[in-house]
Image: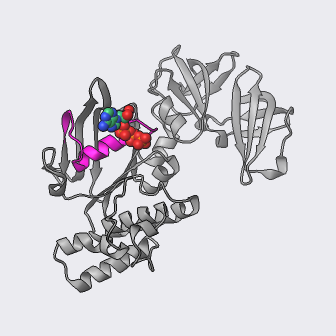
């Protein structure tokens, strides 16, 4: 017996000689919100379509609520889904589209009317009941597809980029509403997206995929703070990589000897062996930048080669004395620094992570 709502085990999908999904395994617990996140072509949609039953795996199994559904047709899998190609029935009104599944399930007229009203309300479509799909924008159609899935109150919901056609403001609002709704209905959700902000803000855990494989499965905070590989560090947020070799430093923690010979200390212990080629990983928003000379541990000197103003944030590019370029992000507007200035950057040891060049840290 398992408490998991979805279990994906050793799933492979080949198209001819190409492997789209390469031995992928993960689980989604009851009531959990899990995202599949990765760049275009990494196999997210293919994985989701196989779970839904719209594509057959070359190898591997799927279980939904502890039942092997690998060979079952989609309608027998007891899943709700919202896909990118949100085909609505063109001859039906919005209300008819949303209520159709409930009608098939022989629910009462009053119950159906209630559910239609509720689903349209949460998707911001109240008032659109009598429109036909062709009288709606792409984003509105996408919301009808979402409302249609929600009306059925599925225990397990699969979604493939359901907010991708919405403009930014609406996407952010819908994202919050979706999260709120999911938590309220305790709906197990597996969500495909290439948008890291969406994945981090919505999910209990995120499965990061790259080239058909799983790179890391972790809670958003863990992914950001402790990326397992350079790929994850780069894909989730912005990061600086400084190359060097690992050195043991006092107290058993790890240091990185940069190409310039300077050693930076990291607070956390890692599995990297001294002498190994490594990358020091530094998030731009975790550094402090000053124009006053400072000395001491983990101070990097350099020259500002670019200052960019983004409203809420200032972004600096610094050429370090060792030659590397380091990006820094600053929220303190009293200290706008002009290009060309000599600057000093401090990276606290707890903000520096050491990762082996092959990937695993
Ligand atoms: P996107 O975010 O662009 O939708 P994705 O991560 O969802 O990307 P998939 O659509 O799962 O990626 O595709 C994974 C790989 O499998 C891609 O290289 C794609 O070209 C390939 N692929 C997908 N469907 C087929 C198919 N029916 N026939 C052949 N190759 C396919």
Taking depth in this image into account, of 125 and 283 the one nearest to the observer is 125
Q: Which residue is at 22% across, 38% downward?
A: 9
Residue at 86% in and 39% down = 338
Any part of residue 43 in sight: no
Can you give x and y, in whole percent of width and height, for residue 196 in the image?
A: 50, 46
The x, y position of residue 271, in whole percent, is 44, 25
Q: Is residue 332 magenta?
A: no
Q: Quadrant of residue 115?
A: bottom left
The answer, for residue 192, to whether it is visible in the render is yes
Answer left or right for 12 relative to 67.
Answer: right
In this view, the residue farthest toward the bottom is 110
Is 49 magenta? The answer is yes
Q: Which of these two is toward me, 52 or 327?
A: 52
Residue stretch rendered in magenta on the structure: 38-61
**Name of the residue lying farthest toward the top:** 275
Task: Point out residue 239 in the picture as x, y percentages from the top left corner.
Answer: 60, 35
Name the one closer to the observer, 239 or 19. 19
Number of numbered tags placed on the structure image: 0
Give the residue at x 36% y 42%: 44
Residue 129: give x, y in percent of width and height. 39, 78
Q: Residue 253 versus residue 343: which sits nearer the camera?
A: 343
Side (left or right) of 287 relative to 151: right
């Amino acid at each position: 017996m398992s408490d998991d709502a979805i279990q994906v085990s050793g799933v492979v999908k080949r198209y001819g000689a190409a492997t789209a999904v390469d031995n992928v395994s993960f689980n989604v617990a009851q009531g959990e919100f899990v995202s599949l996140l990765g760049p275009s072509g990494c196999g997210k949609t293919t994985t989701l379509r196989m779970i839904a039953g719209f594509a057959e795996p070359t190898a591997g199994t799927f279980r939904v609520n502890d039942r092997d559904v690998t060979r079952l047709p989609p309608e027998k899998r007891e899943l709700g889904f919202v896909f990118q190609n949100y085909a609505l029935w063109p001859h039906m009104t919005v209300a008819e589209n949303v209520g159709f599944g409930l009608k098939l399930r022989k629910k009462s007229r009053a119950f159906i009317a209630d559910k239609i009203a509720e689903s349209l309300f949460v998707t911001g479509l109240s008032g659109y009941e009598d429109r036909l799909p062709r009288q709606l924008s792409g984003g509105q159609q996408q919301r009808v597809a979402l409302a249609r899935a929600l009306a059925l109150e599925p225990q397990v919901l699969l979604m493939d980029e359901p907010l991708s056609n919405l403009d930014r403001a609406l996407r952010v609002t819908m994202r919050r509403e979706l999260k709120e709704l999911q938590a309220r209905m305790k709906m197990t959700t597996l969500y495909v997206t290439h948008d890291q902000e969406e994945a981090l803000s919505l999910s209990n855990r995120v499965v990061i995929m790259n080239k058909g494989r799983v790179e890391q499965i972790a809670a958003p905070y863990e992914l950001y703070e402790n990326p397992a590989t350079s790929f994850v560090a780069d894909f989730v947020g912005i990061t600086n990589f400084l190359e060097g070799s690992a050195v043991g430093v006092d107290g058993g923690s790890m240091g990185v000897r940069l190409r310039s010979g300077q050693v930076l200390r990291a607070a956390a212990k890692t599995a990297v062996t001294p002498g190994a080629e490594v990358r020091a990983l530094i998030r731009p928003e975790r550094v402090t930048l000053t124009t006053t000379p400072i000395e001491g541990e983990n101070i990097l000197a350099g020259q500002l080669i670019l200052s960019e103003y983004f409203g809420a944030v200032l972004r600096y590019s610094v050429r370090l004395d060792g030659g590397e370029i380091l990006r820094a992000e600053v929220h303190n507007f009293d200290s706008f620094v002009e290009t060309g200035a000599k600057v000093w950057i401090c990276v606290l040891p707890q903000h520096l992570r050491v990762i082996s060049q092959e990937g695993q840290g």
